[in-house]
Image: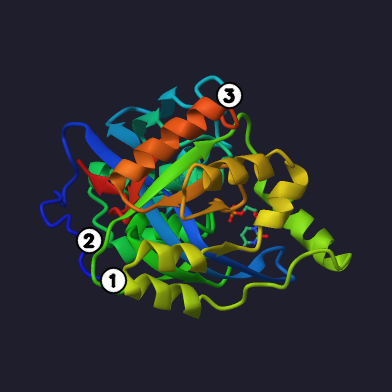
Amino acid sequence: WGPGGDGDQPRRGATGPVRVRVPAKINLHLGVGPLRPDGYHELNTVYHAISIHDELTARHGDTLILTMEGEGAGELALDETNLIIRAARALAAHAGMPAHARLHLRKQIPLAGGLAGGSADAAATLLACDTLWGTGLSRDELADIGAGLGSDIPFLVHGGTALGTGHGETVSPVLARPSTWHWVVAIADGGLSTPAVYHEIDRLRDTGTAPPALGSADALLAALRQRDPAVLGAALGNDLQPAAVSLRPALADVLDAGRAAGALAGLVSGSGPTCVFLAADAADARRIADELAASGVCREARTAHGPVAGARIV
Ligand code: C5P
């Protein structure tokens, strides 16, 4: 990874509030390997950061406090179990300082949606508290701390499009000439539990009813280089999709509706239940989103583009 682009970041800590924007992620390719002894599955994935953002503001305080507004307010626990609080504590422990901050989250990424919203917030917290406290860690060091908290956090520290291996925590950037891809994001009512979806793919594989595993991401990476949305659409794939559809059969209707509306391709995002559709261009994405929203198959349909930067100070 190159420099984080926060060269103007104060080393002695910030006096005023530090505001960080962080994107959601989708997986262009999610190849799920066998269950490992540590309870994680080996992954071959291509992460892609899209323009749906949460915003975290950190201020100095005498204790560690989290408040929030937006998506999931009133549902998300703001106590010690919250990944934001855990990330702040992990950074403070690493730096040997007290975890004192007043944190406020403005949330647009749906909860338990397969868009890594919780991991995004943790990545934002690491960057915001690093700046507030003047810890002065590099993005790689923040990503390493994040890896101990959640598989998707290192990617959300970096953003862009990246290959993920291990259980998803080992990321390396995909170096492609910049292209912008246009997406429609169909948000469901209610979330899906990530462990439950992984458990379901194991069950489907054990009973011989899962499609063959996708394996390596080589074909997807080659498709990205061609910069043609029709080629990329044909290469998208997610091993967790049959498991998410098995647990939430109505997702099949969402996928059908997006394709009928003219999307080049559609797939479940990560462990779902959010579905994402690739559009030929921005105007097409708007039209597909309007049609999906009108069809009533999802709670909300938003347009987004990618890749976008990871957590960054605004
Ligand atoms: O790392 P993270 O906390 O996001 O993972 C949540 C859960 O998803 C894990 O506890 C595990 O059940 C499942 N998981 C998995 N294999 C992965 C990533 C996550 O089985 N590579």
User: Where 300 sits versus 258, above or below?
Assistant: above
List the single residue furthest toward the top: 74
Q: Residue at x 36, y 56 (%)?
A: 157
User: Going 28% across and 71% down the picture, which residue do you hit?
Assistant: 1
Tag 3: amino acid:
Glu
Q: How is the image coloured?
A: rainbow
Q: Which residue is mark 1?
A: 1
Q: Provide residue 144's location: percent of width, then percent of height.
A: 42, 64
Quadrant position of residue 288: top left
| Label pair 1/2, CB-CB below 8 angstroms | yes
Q: Earlier in the sequence, mark 3 or mark 2?
A: 2
Identity of the residue drawn at 36% across and 35% down: 100
Tell me residue 90's x, y (percent).
46, 50
Give the residue at mark 2.
4
Q: Residues within 10 Å of mark 1 (few under 14, many from 20)?
A: few
Q: Amino acid at mark 2?
A: Gly
Can you tell me whether the CB of the residue at mark 1 lies under 8 Å from the nearest atom of ligand 1?
A: no
Residue type at tag 1: Trp
Neighbour tally class for label 3: few under 14, some 14-19, many 20 plus, Cα within 10 Å: few
**Image quadrant containing the C terminus:** top left
Residue 159 visible in the displayed image: yes
Specify whether 11 is left or right of 43.
Answer: left
